[in-house]
Image (cartoon, helix red, strand yellow):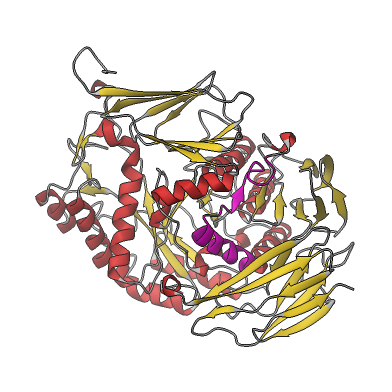
Amino acid sequence: MPTNNGTGPYKAIGTFTSKGGEQFYGLGQHQLTQPGKLAYSGSTQLMQKNPGESSVPLLFSSGGYGILWDNPSVTTVNLAGDIVMTSEVANLVDYYFMAGPKADDVVASYRALTGAAPLFGRWALGYWQSKDHYGSQSELLEVASTYRSMQIPIDNIVQDWQYWGSNPWGSHQFSQSYPDPAGMFKTLHQTGFHTMISVWGRFASGSANYDALKSAGGFITPILGDGKTYYYDPFKAEGRSLYWQQMNTGLFSKGVDGWWLDATEPELNQPPEWGEFRNFQTAAGLGAVVYNAYPLMTTTAVHDGQRATTSDKRVFILTRSAYSGQQRNGAVTWSGDISGDWATFKRQIPAGLNFSLSGIPYWTTDIGGYFLSGLGGPGSSAYTELFERWFQFGAFCPMFRTHGTGPDRNIYSFGSGAQTVLLGVDQLRYRLLSYIYSMSWMVTHQAYTMMRALVFDFASDPMALNVPDEYMFGPAILVNPVSDAGATSRSVYLPANTNWYDFWSGATLQGGQKVMAAAPIDRIPLYVRAGSILPMGPVMQYATEKPADPIELRVYRGADGTFELYEDENDNYNYEMGAFATIPMTWSEAKRTLTIGARQGSFPGMLQRRTFRVIFVAQSHGAGAAESATADRTITYTGAAVDVAAP
């Protein structure tokens, strides 16, 4: 229908009759319009905003189907009765049904249509330290050096904005506080660090980069933002090409490993007189027509540019907004510039779950909140408790990273008691890297989802369909963050039709019930599904410090189970040509036997012999984060299949 009495532009309206009794999820993340909710209700606006409003127009139903509304203009989804999707401007109505019956089937269909998610380097799954912002080369190197000297596992350190000093926005020039950027990155690489750097699509006059883009007609018009700077136009092929070329020359060639593409909404700050149709021009037409797709196109510029430059380093992008298809660009979305308080923390959990139900598998949050609130900072006991609990949640997100304004929030910046808690969480993350990296392969190879609302695995359990603060982290681990101040326990629903093991004690519990889980400050309640095979490697100082060997294989009996251990060269694209190896593992409950199958494939540097310490978990046996003192069997594995009988 026309948006006015003229002949166009048009609104697109789609009305779909639901089955009734359904729960609805997905649509990106909506912390402001659907705060704290997992299942949506009422009306949700799909419009990129900071913080926490990333708009991905995939609606998933607990009835076992999805609808991809293929329109990047600002859209309203109303679920009060029928499903009504209304886009403020369109040239046609375009949508797709994704058949189930499982959530994984819907996600697989979505990715078949919009693109597979490539594999990140193993380093990207380790711990990230960041702040707003390091002000000099010496400061950044000192933080990295302190982590190494204190033997706190970490892989990445982030240089946020303003490293350009008085140089113009978009110049990609370092200030005098960074006398040797290439040398800085080289030093970090030599000590096992990777580095991400902040880049904006925003340019001020006075640099060669600005001049080149202006000459090519590579800016959105009219002037946006603060009235002095332009945003480049990623809808123009030449604009995308220049944007990457400038990043490559100024930053990538010096040793940068990953990209923080900030303000990818972008921050247009449009004057009110422009009206609802977002009256700015892009190479693809009126801004209103393409509004929500800006993050997709700007991540496309960087992904495609880096892939064309080299296959030796996998693309990693962190971006504040997201749109359908963005997973194919090696992009992770974070939840925006949020506040450090308990209410905001609680909202992060369903936000991340809905984002993952939108078909995009990688999501993260600023641990501790970007802005400090009334709780104070690292010197405050109230804030320290929040940070510890948020840090525990962060360790069970696809990406594990700290970031924020104000005082340093390094692990070692908190008191000794908190440091012990944080270090324990960090070390557990590193023990789980083989599990997490294998899950990443599942994401790439099987269209899998790591961070799984309970509807993924327990759709037949009505009690599991609207639990906003529990989720599966991969096939094995049920995660139950503690998001209330002062809590030392929390209620946990254990989904039905399976049994569960308390990760910390090894005790078994029946599914289909609520339990009160102990949650002292150093413990996040974790449960492992019966039938799981959980690989746990040694603690490392960084993800590729040494081969992950020996690996402790924890077998949780009570149901049949499988797991496939994946390994490759860790950071290039040779896996796309078959340079990887998998080791299939199967637990047969009837035979009471673990079969470590024959290894499939190979890659340069692969361990020819490795050690598996097999543990059949029971009460006080194979429980907790530390390495088990005794194994039920120790296997020297050379690639041939081997059976291990349970005692």
Up the image or down, 489 lies above or below 392; here it is: above
Horizontal and vertical percent for residue 637? 69, 84
The residue at 23%/49% (across/down) is 203
Indicate the position of residue 422 as horizontal and vertical percent values: 67, 59
Residue at 26 percent across and 26 percent down: it is 271
Which of the 4 image quadrants contains residue 69? top left
Q: Position of residue 78 (x, y in %)?
A: 48, 22
Q: Quadrant of the N terminus?
A: top left
The answer to whether residue 105 shows anywhere in this view is: yes
For residue 405, say whether it is visible. Answer: no
Instruction: Specify the segment rendered in magenta.
Output: 432-459
* 55 is higher (above) or lower (below) than 577: above
Q: Position of residue 491 (x, y in %)?
A: 79, 39
Look at the image and say whether residue 484 sits in the magenta stretch: no
Horizontally, is 164 left or right of 523 in the view? left
Q: Is residue 440 magenta?
A: yes
Q: Residue furthest top?
A: 5
As drawn, is 313 to the left or to the right of 553? left
User: What residue appears at the point 53 percent right and 58 percent down from the top-left corner?
Assistant: 446
Q: Quadrant of the C terminus?
A: bottom right
Toward which corner of the image does residue 507 lie, by quadrant?
bottom right
Observer-nearest residue: 127 or 20? 20
